[in-house]
Amino acid sequence: MASVPEPTSPARLVVLVSGSGTNLQAILDAVAAQGPRGYGAEVVAVGADRDGIEGLRRAERAGLPTFVQRVRDHATRVDWDRALTDSVAAHRPDLVVSAGFMKIVGADFLAAFGGRFINTHPALLPSFPGAHGVRDALAHGAKVTGCTVHFVDAGVDSGPIIAQEAVEIRDEDDEISLHERIKEVERRLLVEVVGRIARHGYHIEGRKVYIP
């Protein structure tokens, strides 16, 4: 069982991005609107696996420190994972949030941040895990899909589920239109979940996540 008590001060968030950073922006907007104490958390740094992306520019405009750890700059994937772990740990996060971070972390990262690393997935897990959740749901003929906010473990989209919300699949949907509707729900749900966890704490028993 992993357990995090109710915090007494705003939780420190390190957010990881790989692209445009719209989920990051949603969190930044919530913190700005409610204040760190009202929301329960503040973003203390933003990291990425590549440079020159809008997600990093969003962080810089917000005055946040950033770091980049590119896989190709390291001799092995294990070396990259250790470097990423060190970069995140330097900012002493209470929670790490994957906001569209498109790399699978390794054993060192999970040893440091397991049970504290939150991710989103554009399907209702355990259905349609992996990189093509939206495409797979359409190909399967599903009538309903959605998004999942979950803790990351050593598997692929297999960690304990924190929250889910359904999205109807329409007859006229293609992968792009469906994914856009899922993203709208995903941003809102991620902001809600991170705020609730930051304000109230949580504990994990087996595969179940409990937020007071």
Image (spheres, grey):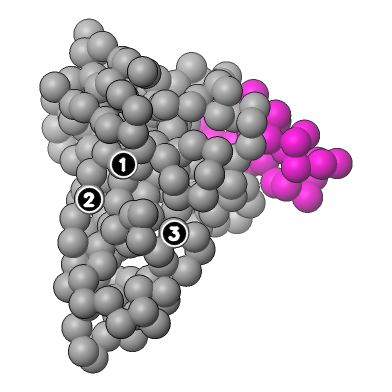
Q: Residue at x 18, y 20 (%)?
A: 200
- Label drawn at residue 164: 2
Q: Residue at x 40, y 64 (%)?
A: 128
User: Magenta part of the protein: which range?
Assistant: 58-86
Answer few, some or many: residues within 10 Å of disc 1's Cα (few below 14, many 20 plus, some between 14 and 19). Answer: many
Q: Position of residue 170 (x, y in %)?
A: 19, 83
Q: Position of residue 38 (x, y in %)?
A: 14, 25
Residue most extreme to the right: 75
* SS at badge 3: loop
18 in relation to 178, above or below: above
Answer few, some or many: residues within 10 Å of disc 2's Cα (few below 14, many 20 plus, some between 14 and 19). Answer: many
- Badge 2 vs badge 1, beta-carbon distance below 8 Å: yes
Taking the image as shown, residue 175 lies to the left or right of residue 132, namely: left
- Label drawn at residue 161: 1
Q: Residue at x 33, y 34 (%)?
A: 207
Q: Residue at x 16, y 37 (%)?
A: 33
Q: Disc 3 designates what residue?
A: 129
Amino acid type at image mark 3: Pro
